[in-house]
Amino acid sequence: MTDGAAVASPIFAGHFSGRRAVVTGAARGIGLGIAQAFAECGAAVLLVDRDPGVVEAAENLVSRGHEASSAVVDLTNEDEVTALFARVREDWGALDVLVNNAGIITISDVESLRTADFARVLAVNTTAAFTTTREAVPLLRAAGGGSVLNASSGQGRQGFIYTPHYAASKMGIIGMSQSLAKELAPDQIRVNCYCPGIVETEMWAYNDAEWGRRLGEYQPGELIAEWIDDIPLRRPAAVADVANLLLYLASDAGSYITGQAINVDGGMFMS
Ligand code: NAD
């Protein structure tokens, strides 16, 4: 997402003018693409990541004429998250869109997987999305309603081998989103999940190497190529494919959709 190419479909041009969005895990990969997409459509975007590279990511958006700022936050630290949303209240007073995109994965056989590592994946992928949502609710109410978008995965549909913690976290976030969607619907706060298939980010470079090593004699790039071959649309997702689903869900056109988990995976999973 550093080549300056547009991410958002022109059909959403200007749609988010005057709206405010927080995007987590926005230093790189899918999160950076989502932040760029909302900014291209006129939103003021706060990019959040524990990686200090998020500062430069936001500056790049500003240099392209967008409204963007950044915060370096470890989302598993409750105090840091509370302080983050205190800042949002001070700066904006209200919030329209929260994207809980930050996530981590490790690949491990069951006997090597330490309980602390299991818990760390749940802490980032599931629990942190709860903490941010809790802190954001008063601000979403202040905006008269809004949209929470949570990163699930193909592993929210079916657990893959060597990732019981990641599968638990990505199925867990779907259940959490359904529960919150019911509670927050009277405030017109909608909560949905997006389930990407394969997006060629740094996370997938790790997956290809680690799964490839454990599943057979795969050379770098061979395993992912084999998996892509099984996708009905025969290509990985572009970051834009994911970002445009989120634009739709957060837009006025998506105003009747809540409590859903939507696959954006080229047909990899069909339920
Ligand atoms: P990535 O590893 O490229 O980026 C994740 C970002 O999250 C990084 O910038 C990282 O610093 C940030 N992050 C991690 N822990 C954090 C913490 N404690 N506090 C703050 N920031 C933190 O990953 P990606 O491929 O862009 O994936 C984005 C989301 O999409 C993740 O939730 C991932 O599980 C999900 N997903 C990705 C794929 C894929 O194929 N890449 C598929 C399905 C789901």
Image: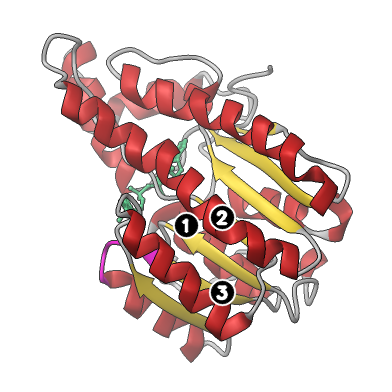
Q: Which residue is mark 1?
A: 31
Residue 220, image quadrant: top left
- Does the image show residue 152? yes
- Looking at the image, do the residues carrying marks 2 and 3 touch, with CB atoms under 8 Å apart? no
Which residue is at the front of the view, 209 or 186? 186
Q: Which residues are magenta?
A: 48-52
Say which mark, if any, is on residue 99. Answer: 2
In the image, is residue 133 above or below residue 145?
A: above
Q: Which is in the foreground here, disc 1 or disc 2?
A: 2
* Residue 49 lies in the magenta-colored region: yes
Callout 3 crowding tier (Cα within 10 Å): few <14, some 14–19, many ≥20: many
* Amino acid at pointer 3: Val
Residue 85 picture location, percent across and down: 49, 68
Of mark 2 and mark 3, the one earlier in the sequence is: 3
The quadrant of the picture occupied by the C terminus is: top right
Estimate the spatial distance between the alpha carbons at disc 2 and disc 3, rounded to whole Å.
11 Å
Estimate the spatial distance between the alpha carbons at disc 1 and disc 2, rounded to whole Å.
8 Å
Most common secondary structure along the magenta stretch: loop
Mark 1 falls on what kind of element? Answer: helix
In the image, is residue 95 above or below residue 91?
A: above
- Looking at the image, do the residues carrying marks 3 and 1 touch, with CB atoms under 8 Å apart? no
Mark 2 residue CB less than 8 A from any atom of ligand 1 = no
Mark 1 residue CB less than 8 A from any atom of ligand 1 = yes
Say which mark, if any, is on residue 45. Answer: 3
| Left or right placement of residue 262 versus residue 10 in this view | left
Q: Please report the residue visible at 71 percent of the width from the left and 54 percent of the height from the top.
A: 147
Residue 1 picture location, percent across and down: 44, 65
Colour scheme: secondary structure
- Looking at the image, do the residues carrying marks 1 and 2 touch, with CB atoms under 8 Å apart? yes
Residue 230 picture location, percent across and down: 52, 18
Estimate the spatial distance between the alpha carbons at disc 3 and disc 1, rounded to whole Å.
12 Å
